[in-house]
Image: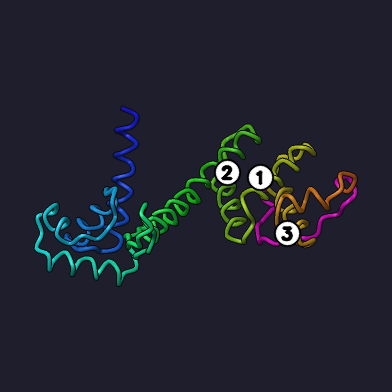
């Protein structure tokens, strides 16, 4: 059952990507054929018979997929040292992978909110969520934001204002990653540093 579900997810991703590329039915069928084929040698006769498609239609779909750079041809040697050309779907798979990364990036926002709620021990307000989104939009990585959150928790200060000032201070010093913070930011500085004004324009006076 698990394998069946995994296969359905893979097929769903394949179909979504194909729809995004506005493929014709013949292009989609040919791409699906290559995706499920163990032998990616372009044999127009076998493909036409398998897909029940006219050979001219197969060639037309093949050329179109090549023009859209969804497939390409790689030359390689077979077991006898003979050079053969195989169809490669790396470009299409890269498109799928890029879309997956975008989806993961969006989903990770939910994760960072959950981390804040866990550390604060309360539900985040709409303002809290807007501030976190503002940090992300400003270019702060989620890893760095979480590190600033942990810095606040370490010092027993559970406010967005404090975290914002930590981020500002790190940004002022040129720290872009947690590794840079850990390498350059000495523990003793935590008690001594004086924060400068926030880089974000929030009304902290009304913060509860």
- What predominant SS class does the magenta segment belong to? loop
Q: Residue furthest top?
A: 1
Q: Mark 3: few, some, or many residues within 10 Å (few <14, many ≥20)?
A: some
**Real-space CA distance between mark 2 and mark 3, rounded to the nearest whole angstrom:** 21 Å
Image: magenta residue range: 190-208
Earlier along the polypeptide chain: callout 1 or callout 2? 2
Residue 195 counted in the magenta span: yes
**Residue 172: where, in percent of width, then height?**
77, 62
Residue that mark 1 sits on: 146
Quadrant of res 1: top left
- Nearest-to-viewer mark from 3 and 1: 1
**Real-space CA distance between mark 3 and mark 1, rounded to the nearest whole angstrom:** 17 Å
Q: Is residue 11 above or below residue 59?
A: above
Which type of secondary structure does the marked residue at label 1 adopt?
Answer: helix
Residue that mark 3 sits on: 198
Q: Mark 1: few, some, or many residues within 10 Å (few <14, many ≥20)?
A: some
Residue that mark 2 sits on: 112
**Real-space CA distance between mark 1 and mark 2, rounded to the nearest whole angstrom:** 7 Å
């Amino acid at each position: 059952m698990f394998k069946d579900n995994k296969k359905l997810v893979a097929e769903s991703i394949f179909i979504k990507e194909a729809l995004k590329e506005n493929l014709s039915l013949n292009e989609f069928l040919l791409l699906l054929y290559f995706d499920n084929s163990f032998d990616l040698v372009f044999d127009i006769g076998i493909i036409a018979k398998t897909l029940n498609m006219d050979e001219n239609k197969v060639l037309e779909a093949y050329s179109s997929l090549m023009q859209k750079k969804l497939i390409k041809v790689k030359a390689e040697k077979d077991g006898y040292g003979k050079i053969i050309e195989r169809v490669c779907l790396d470009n299409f798979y890269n498109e799928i992978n890029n879309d997956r990364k975008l989806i993961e990036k969006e989903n990770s926002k939910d994760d960072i909110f959950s981390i804040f709620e866990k550390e604060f021990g309360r539900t985040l307000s709409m303002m809290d969520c807007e501030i976190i989104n503002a940090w992300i939009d400003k270019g702060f990585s989620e890893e760095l934001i979480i590190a600033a959150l942990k810095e606040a928790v370490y010092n027993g200060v559970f406010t967005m204002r404090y975290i914002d000032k930590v981020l500002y201070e790190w940004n002022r010093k040129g720290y872009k990653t947690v590794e840079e913070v850990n390498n350059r930011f000495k523990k003793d500085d935590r008690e001594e540093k004086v924060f400068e004004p926030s880089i974000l324009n929030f009304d902290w006076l009304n913060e509860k």
